[in-house]
Amino acid sequence: MQQVNMTTFEYRAAFSLAGIFAFRLLGLFIVLPLLAIYAGGLKGITPTLLGISMGIYGLTQAFLQIPFGMLSDRYGRKPLISIGLIIFALGSIVAALSTSIYGLILGRALQGAGAIGSTLLALLADLTREEHRSKAMAVVGMIIGLSFSVALLLGPFLEQFIGVSGLFWLTGVLALLGLCILYWVVPHPEQSIFHRDTEPEPAQLISIIKNKELLRLDAGIFFLHAILTASFVAIPVILRDQAHIAISQQWKVYLIVLIAAFVMMVPAIILAEKKYFKPVFLSAIGGIIVAELGLLISHQTSEFIICLSLFLGAFSVLEALLPSLVAKTAPTVHKGSAMGVYSSAQFFGIFVGGLMGGWLYGSHATSGVFLGSCLLACIWFIVAKTMEQPRLSSTYMIKIGPHCEGNSQSICAQLLEIPGVLEATVTDDDGIAYLKVDKQLLDFTLLHKFSMVS
């Protein structure tokens, strides 16, 4: 027996919320390949302040995303998402109007302060059944990955028509368009409740941080985004000054690079999801190291583009594998807490990467940026080499219902007898079974006998 398909209601919720994610991420990433050059013409610019302007949104996002989610449990999802989008739009306007680096930093900080990522996921959880939440999250993840690629292409292409300040105005408009989607397209939930699979529990954060395997993955996403942000302090400058490619034409380079990266990414992820997760993961980190060294020593434009393709290909593989690793490693019942810490590490890495990249650029030019990024990747490789081979499992949930109260241990034991169920936790308070399963072996017929949902 196969799983019942997602309903039209659930697809509408997933794609409309993914659209809001996309608009917001486009606003953050669309200036990434431009900011290093654009900020050079602002008053008060220094290399370190340039780096801060590139990464400051990560700092405000890291500190505010968990509070936003907690407040949404109390005051409602849509009001908090609305506040976040308005703050983001205000940040875009401040950045668009700024003539000094300090104004740009303030605008970028405000953009990050609209930290609605966890709240959007919580609303998605309100609008989808437990059995189909992983599919809905996959839709959002796909859109997030696509947004980064589109932003790299759109930024340099549109800059020739509207300039960087125009791009900031555009991102403000996209944020307001997100508000329209929120109230006119996104369904309204019947109720908003706490979801352990998408929202962090403050009481569990310490235990999650103490988990060595999860901490290793948190360090990984920190290193990955620190390296990405630092590298883009130098990449646009080299394309302009050494490859003599005008910033308005650099989108053509990114198009070639992203196609090559996609060709590398697909087989790597297929191999990883078979039986070779750890070797593929370590190879991708090795690819980052080789790419950064190549960017450091390349003298020809073609060499630089090949190394840039390797860098973004390895980045794409790691960006896809790391969340999957967290889901496989974290206790299923505390997946939301694990992802909350993971996301905070990611955004803090963006800030540190910008700060590091700007400082190294000021001290040692572009070579210092690539060398520093290479050293970070080497440290990451050493940390990751001791990771355990993850089990080939997926997370899955079913609504057991109130009749499980006081009987959760017995139900857990019965669930573990079903072929394909590897781990099971049943909670008394919300009547949900949190499972890790091997979907190739899972007997859905037996499993859904426990579900109160048709």
Image (tube, rainbow, N blue to C red):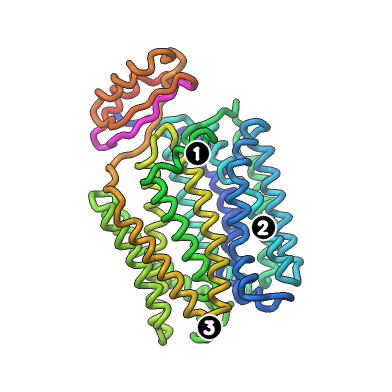
Q: Amino acid at mark 1?
A: Leu
| Residue under the image location 39 percent in, 25 percent down | 433
The residue tagged with tag 3: helix, strand or loop?
Answer: loop
Q: Nearer the viewer, residue 146 or 348?
A: 348
| Residue 370 on the magenta span | no
Asked where in the image residue 248 lies, by quadrant, the reply is bottom right
Q: How far, Cα to Cα, is label 2 from label 3?
A: 30 Å
Q: Give the residue number, with chain letter if any, for mark 1.
A: 205
Q: Which residues are magenta?
A: 430-441
Badge number at residue 245 = 3
> Which of pointers 3 and 1 indicates the residue nearer the eye?
1
In-front residue for pair 453/360: 360
Q: Please rate how many residues cluster around mark 3, counting C-alpha atoms within 10 Å: few if below 14, some from 14 to 19, many from 20.
A: some
Q: Would residue 8 be visible to someone looking at this image?
A: no
Tag 1's secondary structure?
helix
Q: Nearer the viewer, residue 275 or 217?
A: 217
Q: Is residue 25 above or below residue 241?
A: above
Residue that numbered label 2 is attached to: 109
Q: Amino acid at mark 3?
A: Ile
Say left or right for 220 vs 163: left
Q: Earlier in the sequence, mark 2 or mark 1?
A: 2
Label 2: how many residues lie within 10 Å, few (<14), some (14-19) or many (20+)?
A: many
Q: Is residue 90 left or right of residue 261?
A: right
The first of marks 3 and 1 along the sequence is: 1
Percent position of residue 9, x then y: 53, 33
Q: CA distance from mark 2 to mark 1?
A: 25 Å
Dots 2, 1 in contact, CB < 8 A: no
* Helix, strand or loop at mark 2: helix
Q: Is residue 432 magenta?
A: yes
